[in-house]
Image (cartoon, rainbow, N blue to C red):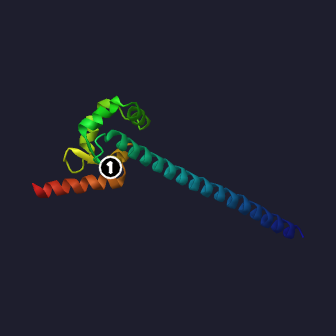
Amino acid sequence: FVLYIVIGNLVLMNLVLAVVLETSLEIVNTDEDTKAKTLQAQTVRRMRQLKHLFTILNSSGTGRLTKHEMLAGFQDEKARICFQALELECGECADIFDRIDADFNAVLTMQEFVGGLSRIRGNCTSKDCLIVLKAIEQLDTQI
């Protein structure tokens, strides 16, 4: 009889433990989903901000941004607010322009502008390292 009670208690404790663990795992998975959705929403919002900033800076309306237009954008209050929201300073503009000008033609398309500025913020990923490595290999074969 005592053996029956001991085994019954162990089974009951295992069931309670299983329910607690299952609930905990569900909470963790929900938190991860929420974080992923939040990160995606932030990325979309940042892309919209960058496109809006490009439109403000592109005073000529050509769809191609020159370094002069980008530097002149700091005179515009709306552009200055956008730059501040993106944590960019005027002193960095010329250097940033040169770094994100992918085809080295002294003008930026919206794609170059948005893509370049979106990569500037945050940590370097393995994908970014691979892109740099491939670019170096291309330059090496050209030399």
Kind of residue indicated by mark 1 = Met
Is the residue 5 above or below the residue 25 in the image?
Answer: below
Residue of label 1: 110
- The N terminus appears in which quarter of the rendering? bottom right
Camera sees residue 122:
no
Camera sees residue 126:
yes
Left or right: 13, with 102 as reference point:
right
Q: Position of residue 106 (x, y in %)?
A: 20, 44
Q: Position of residue 16 (x, y in %)?
A: 77, 61
Outermost residue, left direction? 143
Left or right: 98, with 119 as reference point:
left
Q: Position of residue 111 (x, y in %)?
A: 32, 52
**Viewer-proximal residue among 89 and 56:** 56
Outermost residue, right direction? 1
Q: Quadrant of residue 100?
A: top left
How crowded pointer 1 is (Cα within 10 Å; few <14, some 14-19, many 20+) is rated as: some
